[in-house]
Amino acid sequence: MLTSVQKEILQSLINLYRNADASIKGEEIAEIMNRNPGTIRNQMQSLRSLGLVKGVPGPRGGYKPTIKAYHTLNIQASDNQSLVPIFRDGEKVKDITVSQIEFTSITHPGECEAAIKAVGNIKYLDLGDEIRIGPTPVNKLIVDGIVVGRDDMDNILLLDTTAIRSIPKKTVLEVASTDLIQLDPTDSIRNASKILSDRDIEGAPVVEDGHVIGILTLSDIIRAIGRGDEEQNVSEVMSSKNIITVKQDLMIADAIEIMNKNSIGRVIVVDDDASPIGIVTRTDLLDKIAGLR
């Protein structure tokens, strides 16, 4: 049976290895645990003998957790495609994911506690923080709640849930705004800003010959005006890299995953000919999940 110190070392190693995907030096573990590096090295010998840690020789060497280590701490060694994110105040918490959710009761789903097993440094989260977990990869579950407890040793958050819901099986076209405002690449920034302001929207696709070639947001416009470039064409200011478009039959659960993975707040919906027919924002999706639309 592992001691509390060994469990904390192993948990810290897994957290660091997951983010770095490279061998971890004992000094790195000692730093985040606020312990002497010599103590870490001594404990690592025991963990290696138990088959929980593998030593990597060389100047870039260090330690790696074994599959047995994940099993010992009841953590699933999964790839990035199945990571379950945590959000605080609407912003994704970096380098933390959920590996297990255990509810204490489901009699009143919005009034129960949940034990959240996490991978990553949960010390970034404080008691009283309002967080959202999900969607989960299989049943597309989303859990809202308030952090009421934190076990740094076992990397567990105790959550007082306020809402538990699953994502409706709807397509993006069913929740998209189809009254799509399109900008021409030859429009001036001044004209584009008036269009967005009049329609009270924060961004619009730039379309040429029926295809999306970029997207212009209020942030782009503000930067251009700040430089005195309000007479420039939209094509000179728009964002043209990594434009994310999705097919009209994509499920909204998959759209949420795309937004989370690419850290974006909106996607353009296109038809089978790749012509834009709508836009979906994160707010649209959250409203649909909450049953507001």
Image: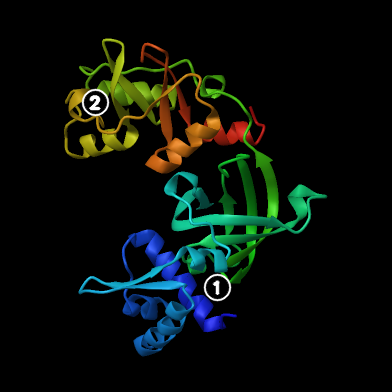
Taking the spot 26% from the left edge, 10% from the top edge, the residue there is 209
Residue 84 picture location, percent across and down? 52, 49
Q: Is residue 99 above or below residue 24?
A: above
The reply to whether residue 27 is visible in this rendering is: yes
**Rendered image quadrant of residue 94:** bottom left
Q: Quadrant of the C terminus?
A: top right
Depth check, front residue: 61 or 158: 61
Q: Amino acid at mark 1?
A: Asp
Image disc number at residue 41 = none
Q: What mark, if any, has residue 189 been given in the picture?
A: 2
Looking at the image, residue 247 lies above or below residue 166: above
**Element type at mark 2:** helix
Q: Quadrant of the N terminus?
A: bottom right
Read off the residue under disc 1.
152
Q: Say left or right for 121 vs 165.
A: left
**Disc 1: CA contacts within 10 A as few (<14), some (14-19) or many (>=20):** some
